[in-house]
Amino acid sequence: MPELVDLRSDTVTKPSPGMRQAMAEAEVGDDVFHEDPSVNRLEEMVAALYGKEAALYVASGTMANQIAIRAQTHHGDEIIMERTSHPFNSEAGALAALAGVQVNLIDGQHGVMDVEQIRPVMRTPNVHHAPTALICLENTHNRGGGSIWPLENIRAIREFARSVSVPLHLDGARLMNACVATGLTPKDYAQYFDSCTLCLSKGLGAPVGSLVIGSTEFITKAHRFRKQFGGGMRQAGILAAAGIYALEHNVERLAEDHLNAKRLARGIADIDGLDIDVNAVATNILYFDVRQPGLTVSTLLERLKTAGVLMLGTGPNSIRAVTHLDVSKEGIERAVEVLRQVVQ
Ligand SMILES: Cc1ncc(COP(=O)(O)O)c(C=O)c1O
């Protein structure tokens, strides 16, 4: 049986032998007391990478977003985000349950918004309104198909947000994918945001962990909410060491994942009964539609699974595939071949 080609998500990667060794050898201490040298090093590394004063290591991307939002809003406030954004759709209702905010949703283009869509939905002071307390962007945008935000859009939203004294948050779970694809640095993006996140357990290949990044004042607040959300970990350096290893070894290679995503997209475009916009594939995530009469997404996914290829159903006609460091060029070629055989 050939090896499984698992394209459901870039979160399915397993730690490499080098990463496991770094974890085994990590210096540790009690991180709730700020005494874990590996966590401290990771936080300093990421703060410097983003050009910010401080960072905080947390368990997951969801926790990172929710802490950042909680620390910049009050219960009952309103935040603005794009309709298909991750914190609204895929964080188990945490915006309501943990951050305690309501959301004003905007329909973007592949997850990307224009400042002119935001301007009119800002709340003016009025006793009937929940005040607009935060604007959130996501780069790259997961449901937008791994799309990359143009800097002009970010800049325009920043300028507007500053003029109305509303902070800007970046869900940067996959910001490194945007950086590798564009040649821009994390600082180039982060300069426009009051708070940012970064996930180590997606394309970067660590088993656990995300960071919240911002000013010292913001991170002090975030630290308290991490504890309140039950995210104070103790000898977390054993995990942070994997994050340090990921940042030192797995950033530049994201370019391979992007090439593989393009390869896969071109293969899919060649198969009758499947529909994809190859030009929309910007990083490591792609979505395609099943248009073959009589073939459902669930049947197609089952057939793929039987042949050793895993993808994710995301709608009545739509499937997502994500490339990552545990899928090779050969794996992608096999996935295309299998797709061709099972779409009938
Ligand atoms: C854009 C984005 N933000 C946040 C998250 C949440 O990360 P986690 O699964 O670690 O909670 C994800 C997860 O896929 C994501 O794609």
Image: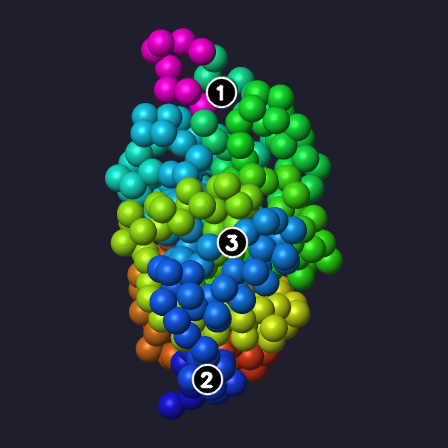
**Cα distance, mark 3 to mark 1?**
31 Å
Q: How is the rendered protein coloured? A: rainbow
Residue at position x 54%, y 66% in the image: 41
- Residue 72 place in picture, x, y as percent: 44, 35
Mark on residue 121?
1
- SS category of the residue bearing label 1: helix
List the residue tagged with mark 3. Answer: 55
Tell me the kind of residue under disc 2. Glu
Q: Nearer the viewer, residue 3 or 22?
A: 22
Which residue corresponds to mark 2?
25
Figure quadrant of residue 78:
top left
The stretch of residues the image draws in magenta is 125-132
Horizontal and vertical percent position of residue 195:
53, 43
> Is residue 341 in sight in this rendering?
no
* Point 39% across, 64% down: residue: 31
- 29 over 138 or under it: above or below: below
Q: Secondary structure under badge 2?
A: loop
